[in-house]
Amino acid sequence: MKAFIKTILAWTGDEKSVSEGALGVVKAYYGCVEAQGRGTLHCHMLVWVEGGLNPDEIKRRLSGGTDSDFRDRLIAFLDDSISNYVPECDEHAPPVASDPPVALQARRRDTSNLVEKCQRHTHTATCFKYCKPGEVPVCRFELDESNTRASTSFNVESGELELRCIDGMINNFNETVLRACRCNMDIKFIGSGASAKAVLYYITDYITKSDLTSHVTFAALEQAVIRSNERVDDSSEPESAEVRGKHLLQSCAYRMMAQQELSSQQIASHLMDYGDHYTSHEYSNLFWRSFENIVDKQDPSSECQPLSKRKYQILDADDAEDDSEVCISVDSNGNLVARASRVSDYINRGRYLKDMSLWEYTARVQK
C-alpha cells in the first residue's frame, strides 16, 4: 500500500508537491483495510484530487448549461480515468517485447487479459441475496449486460453525471492501477452529495461491523455473565455495584475477544506493522460530550435532559469538573505530562484566539 500511495498516487507527504499521479495531483487520501470472509485483505480508499470541486459546485456549473468548457474537460478526465470495457488487442501479439511498436501491442494484450481475468463479473447467489421471492432478480452490484451507455453525459433531471459504460459486466477500473496491482479493483467518481454519503456509509459500515454473528455474541455474553456471578459467589468480601459492573464489562470484552476469528493475513499484517488504515493527514480528537456537559450545566435546555436528572453518567478526563484533579497524558516520547482539560483550555484561550470556533481550535491548537 505504501508503494501504491507513493508511486501510483504520487503522494510524497509534502502538501505543496505538484507531482501528478494516475488520478492527477492528489490533495489527500484516507484508506482502511478490511478482511473478506476468506481472510483476504483489501483496502477501501477515498482520494481527494487537487482542484476538485464539491458536489454542489459541480452540479451548479453543469446544470447551468453555459459552462460547456468545464463540462467537456470534466467528461474527458473521467473517461480517461475510469474504464469499463475490454481493450481490443492482437491475439497473436507477443506477451513481452522491447521493440516500441511490438511493445505497445504486448501492453494492449496484457491489459485485455487482466480485464477479462480480474474485472469481468460473474453472477452468483450473492448478487441476488437481497431479492425477495417473486421479484425479478437484479444484481445488487448493478452489473448487467443490458446496462450500457455509449458516452458520458449529464442528466439534467437527476442532476448527476451518467458515466460511459461500454460493457455492463465489467467493473470500473483505472488502467494504470490495474496494470500495476494486477488484481480486481473498482473505482468510482463521487460527483454528488448522495454518492458521497453512500460511499462514506459503505466504508464506515465495513470498518465498524462486527465479525461475530449474533448467536455467537450472545453466547459469549451469557458465559461472561455466568462466570462473573460465579466469581462473586466465591468471593469472601462483598463488592460494590460499581466494582462488580467493571468486572462484568471486562469479562464480557474478554469473552468476545476470545471468540474473535482472525485470518493469517490479518495476523501477519499486524506483526509486520503494516497498519489497518492509511491517511495523508493527522486528526485531532474532539470529545464533544465534555463540552456538551458544561453547556448543559450552565444553560439547561428543554430539548436535553439535565445532567442532574441523568441516571447514568460516564466521565472521562476531559469531563473532570473538580479543579483539584490533575489530568495526565502521554507525549510523543512516552513520558507522562500534566495537562488541563480541553474545556478549560478553550474557555481560557485568551484574546488572540477568541475568534476561533471550537472546531478550528481543536484542529489547529496543540498543547
Image (spheres, rainbow, N blue to C red):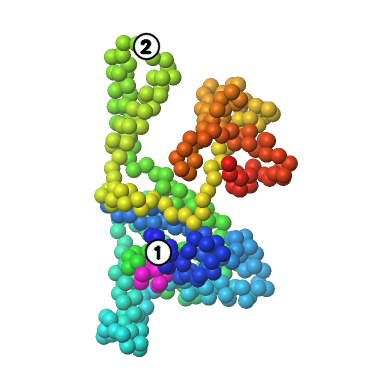
The answer to whether one can see residue 70 in this image is yes
Say which of 305 and 241 sits in front: 241
Identity of the residue drawn at 45% across and 48% down: 204
Say which of 254 and 167 sits in front: 254
Comes first in the chain, label 1 or label 2: 1
Q: Secondary structure at mark 2?
A: loop
Q: Position of residue 45 (x, y in %)?
A: 44, 57
**Vertical position of residue 208 compared to residue 136: above or below:** above
Quadrant of the image occupied by residue 158: bottom right
Which stretch did the figure color magenta? 170-180
Say which of 112 and 350 sits in front: 350
Residue beneath disc 1: 4
Residue beneath disc 2: 238
Residue 108 belongs to the span the image colors magenta: no
Residue type, label 2: Pro
Residue situated furthest right in the rendering:
351
Q: Label 1: few (<14), some or many (≥20) within 10 Å?
A: few
**Vertical position of residue 215 compared to residue 161: above or below:** above
Q: Position of residue 328 (x, y in %)?
A: 51, 32
Residue type, label 1: Phe
Q: Position of residue 212 (x, y in %)?
A: 32, 40
Identity of the residue drawn at 59% across and 66% down: 51
Quarter of the rendering occupied by the N terminus: bottom left
Q: Secondary structure at mark 1?
A: helix
Quadrant of the image occupied by residue 296: top right
**Vertical position of residue 103 compared to residue 194: above or below:** below
Q: Position of residue 362 (x, y in %)?
A: 60, 44
- Disc number at residue 70? none
Identity of the residue drawn at 54% across and 33% down: 338
